[in-house]
Amino acid sequence: MGRVTCDRMYVLFAACVAVARAGVLAPAPLAYAAAPAPILAKAAVAVDTDYDPNPSYNYAYDIHDSLTGDAKSQQESRQGDVVQGSYSLVEPDGSRRTVEYTADPVNGFNAVVHKDAPGVAVATPVVAKVAAPAPIAYSAPITNVVK
C-alpha cells in the first residue's frame, strides 16, 4: 500500500513539473536591421492626351417656378479662350437683374449689370406654424454637499 502512494506521488510530482515548465518560453531575441538603400528613379512625366487647343461649349437653362416664385436663367458659350454669357433673376422687389459678362486673356473678366423696372413683387410663400405643447422643464437633482 505504501508503494502505491509513492507511485502516485511520483506521477503527481512529474505532472506538476510538466505543467510548470510548459508555460515558460524563452524571450524572442531583439534584432536590428540596416535601413534599406534608397531607390533612385526618374519621375514619370504627366502627359495630357485629351488636350484640346480650341475648346468650345454652349449651354443654357431657364427656370420659372410659379409655386416658389423662383425665376432665373443663364446662358454661356466658349470659343477658345473667350467666354461670353449672361444670367438673370427676379429680385424680391419684382425687378429683373441681368448680368452680361465676357472673359478673355486680353481684357480679363468684365460684367455689365442691367436692372429692369420693378414688376409685381414676388410674394414669399407663407409657412404655416405648427402648434406644439410647451416643453416640460425638469429641475436639477438635489445633492447634499458635505464640507
Image (cartoon, grey):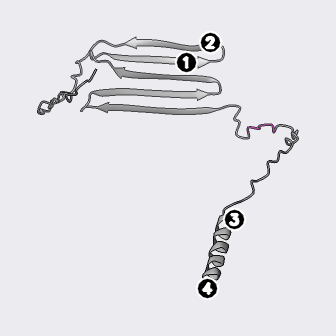
For the record, the magenta segment spans 44-48
Distance between the alpha carbons at the discs numbered 1 and 4? 110 Å
Badge 4 marks a residue whose secondary structure is helix
Badge 3 marks a residue whose secondary structure is helix
**Can you identify the residue that label 1 sits on?**
102
> Disc 1 vs disc 3: which is toward the camera?
3
Distance between the alpha carbons at the discs numbered 2 and 3? 88 Å
On whether residue 59 falls in the magenta region, the answer is: no
- Which is more toward the observer, 47 or 11? 11
Q: Are marks 2 and 3 in contact (CB under 8 Å)?
A: no
| Residue 21 marker | 3
Distance between the alpha carbons at the discs numbered 2 and 4? 112 Å
The residue most toward the front is 2
**Can you identify the residue that label 2 sits on?**
107
In the rendered image, the vertical position of residue 26 relative to residue 109, given as above or below: below
Badge 1 marks a residue whose secondary structure is strand
